[in-house]
Amino acid sequence: MAGVDVDVGTELRLGLPGGGAEAAKAGKRGFEETIDLKLTLPTAGMEEAAAVKTEPAAEKTKRPAEAAAADAEKPPAPKAQAVGWPPVRSYRRNVMTVQSVKNKKEEEPEKQQPTANAGSNSSAFVKVSMDGAPYLRKVDLNMYSSYKDLSIALKKMFSTFTTGNNLNEGKLVDPVSGADVVTTYEDKDGDWMLVGDVPWEMFVESCKRLRIMKSSEAIGLAPRTKDKCKNKS
Amino acid sequence: MSTPRSSSTSSPPQIPQSLTLAHTASSTTSSSSASGMRDAAEDDSDSPPSQMSEDDPGGGGGEGDRWEPDLRGGNGGGGRWAPPDQVLENVLESVLEFLTAARDRNAASLVCRSWYRAEAQTRRELFIGNCYAVSPRRAVERFGGVRAVVLKGKPRFADFSLVPYGWGAYVSPWVAALGPAYPRLERICLKRMTVSDADLALVAKSFPLFKELSLVCCDGFSTLGLADIAERCRHLRVLDLIEDYLEDEEDEMVDWISKFPESNTSLESLVFDCVSVPFNFNALEALVARSPALRRLRVNHHVSVEQLRRLMARAPQLTHLGTGAFRSEAVPDGAMSVSELATSFAASKSLICLSGFREFNSEYLPAIYPVCAKLTSLNFSFASLTSEELKPIVRNCVNLRTFWVLDTVGDEGLKAVAETCSDLRELRVFPLDATEDSEGSVSDVGLQAISEGCPKLESILYFCQRMTNAAVIAMSKNCPDLVVFRLCIMGRHRPDRITGEPMDDGFGAIVMNCKKLTRLSVSGLLTDKAFAYIGKYGKLIKTLSVAFAGNSDMSLQYVFEGCTKLQKLEVRDSPFGDKGLLSGLNYFYNMRFLWMNSCRLTMRGCSEVAQQMQNLVVEVIKDHSDDEGESETVDKLYLYRSLEGPRNDAPPFVNIL
């Protein structure tokens, strides 16, 4: 029986609500938890992860009590995943991720999907840069239908920058300093905002480019759009 | 210099270490799928085995011992000795031309200086299994007439995001050295190296006779570099891009396919399914139309079935086809019918290898029935087929030798394979959901069925969640020809699902009964006992991958002491510490590399290895753990033999001891 290593709230590192593949199992998260997800790993998580290291051969038993205690109000956090395990090449993981996102899109009947078209009518390519990475990526925002999908894709895309080990559990870190990162975007007005605060469709429409930066540098970014809307109108 | 292995084990008499280079421990005459670079490609049945021998250019460890380090090959020598008997050397060169396997050449080069020089002049393919084991300068100085270079860079665990970005394996210094030295170079094959657009441009510029470029699991380049290659390598025959990670271009995407000049009519192989950007289809069609020698074509997922049909019409002589998306792009009533597509397949009388199906529409699957009986290789590993979709297809594939598939077909699907494909040699079953707690759709049942139906199996990669010792033991007995056995039980430390026992006996049976085994990946709940078996019986094992296994350092000791042919050992998340590491001290120089991450190594142990073994490079890769500074534990260790000492391109997070 495989070990269930509960890692409290450590699986999301992109600062997007409901992001991370494991979050699907955790159930929906509200926006109010967005802030939690951007903060550094709490020590509870680290101890558990360290416990994994020191007794890897022993049988692990479920620790539901601990999980319940830690997540009294939140849905149970998903198990910690080891980086690069199971050993499936990143290339393959990326291809399968993109495929599954596309399949999901086509299964949504209420959306106006071009019938046999593999892609969408228009593409909304934006550049994604990560501080410390030497080159950019591009993503087509129309390929995704939620922040969660985008988060999964970004995580996979930048997975080579993860300096992962058991402790980090696949979170994105700045390749130089190891600090946590958040995802920000530049909107139509040229302002830099934290990703995740507006409804998805509004985000897609206004996002011009994405930037993954150190959390420490993200202080002072406009976190709430209410003010902005007020200013506009 | 490593000490010779003790002859107390009952291995067949070996050439004494002083004559044979320690690290040219012979590989088996490998079925090419088991070794070398093309294990990422589907079709190994036709690639020449000799070219993918696993050995380093000879003279490596022996050089410091026996020969002058700057011995120069070439007629007339370096002027430091009396001129050799020129006639004899010419005769020798003519004879040595016939030796192709690196292993044989390494042996020949050790006979005497004359043979060394003759061999150095006649070696046509240079194989370097670790780009940091030798410098470009040294390689170029020794070998005078090289026509093909094969280079491998990062350790394999880089594929699983375990090697941080920027670690190294840059091809630039190699290209810079090869250019002036080998103007007649025809072929370059790279695996897990970082290749920039500038490198590709330099390749295109340096080698006017360039014919073949193969990039496997590489990164750092974009369609800009590809455009240079396409345009300027006028004699290009092969461009194989396999599971590479391309950069995005800053500006407009480059229409690289249309850069192949009209004058290029000698293309034989074009593989670009990993180049995921759209491209100019008309240019591709025109290129295919003017390439009568084209045998392999694997397109990316931007190709619809309508377009595929056009390509197939232009190239009825294809033997290997990657089918792209395998779905229609047209509006529903304009979509092509299955029978039209089937006609195209029926007309491709030479097809033996199919892949692609990236976004397949299952209605089109029956179109491939006409070619199934002739197929020797079928790759469905990016298509989530159900068993019901697979069965009618596989029922016709009586000649299948290589089969890659997703676990969505389930044990049922595998049973169908076992019933029909009695000639199967290689099977890979990948997980649709590659996470530890996934359901897993295949199990010991499927493995057992395969073992019973496919007795000629040589290579297997099997991802599952539920396995039993019994099924593994059955496979060890039913498939004695196994050369590669890679079983990945995805949940960590999972025991036999029926008995609850560790998986020791299963893997033990594999090493005991499969006498040709050279590559092994273990998983599931494993104690030291499994490694005792491996050390005792795994005498031909060259590559061993270990994850979440073992109880104590004894496991490592068993492996180092027992696996006399061990070349590559990769270990992760296992309770092995410095003691286990140090038990390998006498053996590291016989290996290409050792990788260990997330074990129990400390700086002290790693430093001791570095101190005692001056001819090894010991790299400790820092993790960004939160306990900075005083951290004694080493998270990632990568050690490898090298003639050059510490490399000068290591990033800040690599500490070379």
Image (tube, grey):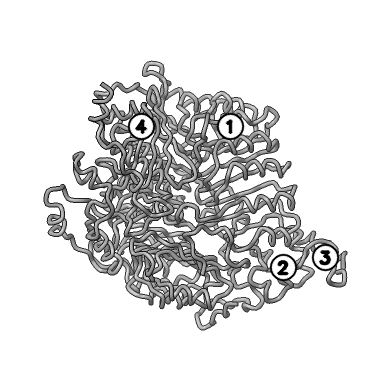
Instruction: Give the spatial CA distance, label 1 vs label 3.
Output: 45 Å
Left or right: B595 in relation to B549 = right
Disc on the earlier residue, 3 or 2: 3
Q: Residues within 10 Å of mark 3 (few under 14, many from 20)?
A: some
- 3 vs 2, front mark: 3
Instruction: Give the spatial CA distance, label 4 vs label 1.
Output: 36 Å
Instruction: Give the spatial CA distance, label 2 vs label 1.
Output: 43 Å
Q: Which residue was labeled with disc 1?
A: B256
Chain bearing mark 3: B
Q: Helix or strand or loop: what does disc 4 sit on?
A: loop
Chain bearing mark 1: B
Q: Which residue was labeled with disc 4?
A: A191
Q: What is the x, y in percent for residue B509?
A: 38, 68
Q: Helix or strand or loop: what does disc 1 sit on?
A: loop
The amino acid marked with disc number 2 is Ser
Image point (85%, 68%), residue name: B79
Chain bearing mark 4: A
Instruction: Give the spatial CA distance, label 4 vs label 2.
Output: 67 Å
Q: Nearer the viewer, residue B286 or B256?
A: B256
The amino acid marked with disc number 3 is Gly
- 3 vs 4, front mark: 4
Q: Nearer the viewer, residue A125 or A32?
A: A32
Please give the label number shown on residue B109.
Answer: 2
Q: Is residue B571 above or below residue A37?
A: below
Image point (15%, 59%), residue name: A66
Q: Residues within 10 Å of mark 1 (few under 14, many from 20)?
A: many
Q: Is residue B318 visible?
A: yes
Q: Which residue was labeled with disc 3?
A: B77
Q: Helix or strand or loop: what does disc 3 sit on?
A: loop
Disc on the earlier residue, 2 or 1: 2
Q: Residues within 10 Å of mark 4 (few under 14, many from 20)?
A: some
